[in-house]
Image: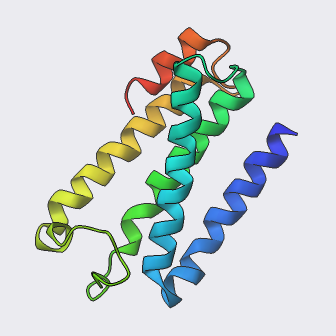
């Protein structure tokens, strides 16, 4: 079941570039929605509001990793449409700085995946350690 969920998430992320060519604003908003949902689950677990399991931990980490891998590709020139986007204009003013932050996010999620192992963090303490870099 866990492998199926990971495969579905990977397929969804793989399909984003085709959609992104049509509407990069919609894609980056969808990626942020996904990341925000993962962060909400992580927050709930860390506050003790949600039960922890390795599958939950791994799902959070993989969702954030997928966002990190794709997010920076959806800020082309001309997509700073303030009427549709909440993205700061500062992104386009310092694209290199923005991409450097995306690279840090990629590194942090890669480290979290490495720490969590192939089956996800086995307990809440391991989850906290894996999420630390993020």
* Residue at image coords 71%, 23%: 54
Q: In this image, 80 relative to 42: left or right?
A: left
Q: Nearer the viewer, residue 51 or 22?
A: 51
Expressed as whole percent of the image width and height from the top left, the position of residue 83 reads 32, 84
Residue 75 against residue 30 in the figure, above or below: below
Expressed as whole percent of the image width and height from the top left, the position of residue 119 reads 72, 25
Residue 31 against residue 5 in the figure, above or below: below
* Residue at image coords 50%, 77%: 26
Residue 98 against residue 118 in the figure, above or below: below
Q: Is residue 59 visible?
A: yes
Q: Is residue 119 visible?
A: no
Expressed as whole percent of the image width and height from the top left, the position of residue 105 reads 36, 44
Q: In this image, 84 relative to 120: left or right?
A: left
The quarter of the picture where residue 84 lies is bottom left
* Residue at image coords 37%, 40%: 107
* Residue at image coords 40%, 46%: 106
Q: In this image, 109 relative to 89: left or right?
A: right
Identify the image quadrant of the C terminus. top left
């Amino acid at each position: 079941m866990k492998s199926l969920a990971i495969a579905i998430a990977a397929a969804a992320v793989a399909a984003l570039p085709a959609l992104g060519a049509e509407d990069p604003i919609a894609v980056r908003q969808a990626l942020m929605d996904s990341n925000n949902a993962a962060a909400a689950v992580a927050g709930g677990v860390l506050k003790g509001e949600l039960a922890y399991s390795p599958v939950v931990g791994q799902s959070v980490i993989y969702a954030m990793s997928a966002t990190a891998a794709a997010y920076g590709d959806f800020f082309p020139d001309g997509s700073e449409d303030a009427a549709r986007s909440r993205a700061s204009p500062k992104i386009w003013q310092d694209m290199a700085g923005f991409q450097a932050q995306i690279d840090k996010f990629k590194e942090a999620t890669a480290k979290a995946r490495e720490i969590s192992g192939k089956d996800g963090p086995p307990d809440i303490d391991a989850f906290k350690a894996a999420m630390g870099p993020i």
